[in-house]
Image (cartoon, grey):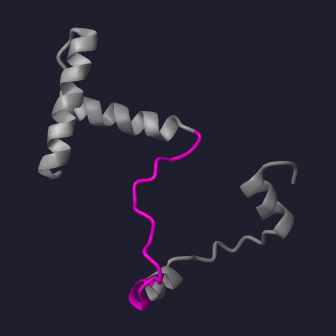
Amino acid sequence: MKISGRANRKLDALQARVRLRTGKRVTKQSVLEDLVERALDRDEAPMLLPAPKYPIPSKLRRLLRTYPEDWGVETAEDEIDAILYGGER
């Protein structure tokens, strides 16, 4: 996997910080794996992509419309609300 020079420098700094705090050598791969695990354990996912610029270009709108798939499951509005906003179904 290739990462940018800027991200690599930040990863180096993070790797050094971990070594200073723990006294143990860690690989960049182990640092990245730990970051991924921590991100997945959080209640909310980190924002990895920038917000879209408005208006969204027509090419991107077409692409977004092709993304949803029908899973063959009927879902009522109250179920969707419960999933999105919490509460009872």
Q: Residue furthest top?
A: 23
Q: Name the foreground residue: 78 vs 49.
A: 49
Residue at screen point 87% across, 49% down: 88
Q: How many marks?
A: 0
Q: Position of residue 62 (x, y in %)?
A: 46, 88
Q: Position of residue 63 (x, y in %)?
A: 44, 83
Magenta residues span 43-60
Q: Is residue 77 left or right of residue 1?
A: right
**Is residue 45 on the magenta stretch?**
yes
Q: Name the foreground residue: 38 vs 55.
A: 55
Q: Position of residue 18 (x, y in %)?
A: 26, 20
Quarter containing the C terminus = bottom right
Q: Name the foreground residue: 78 vs 48.
A: 48
Q: Name the foreground residue: 20 vs 78.
A: 20
Q: Residue furthest left?
A: 5
Figure check: 63 above or below 42: below
Q: Quadrant of residue 83?
A: bottom right
Figure check: 79 above or below 3: below
Residue at screen point 40% across, 60% down: 49
Q: Position of residue 80 (x, y in %)?
A: 77, 63
Figure check: 16 above or below 56: above
Q: Is residue 89 left or right of residue 52?
A: right
Residue at screen point 36% across, 35% down: 35
Magenta stretch: dominant SS? loop
Figure check: 15 above or below 57: above
**Is residue 55 on the magenta stretch?**
yes
Residue at screen point 43% across, 75% down: 53
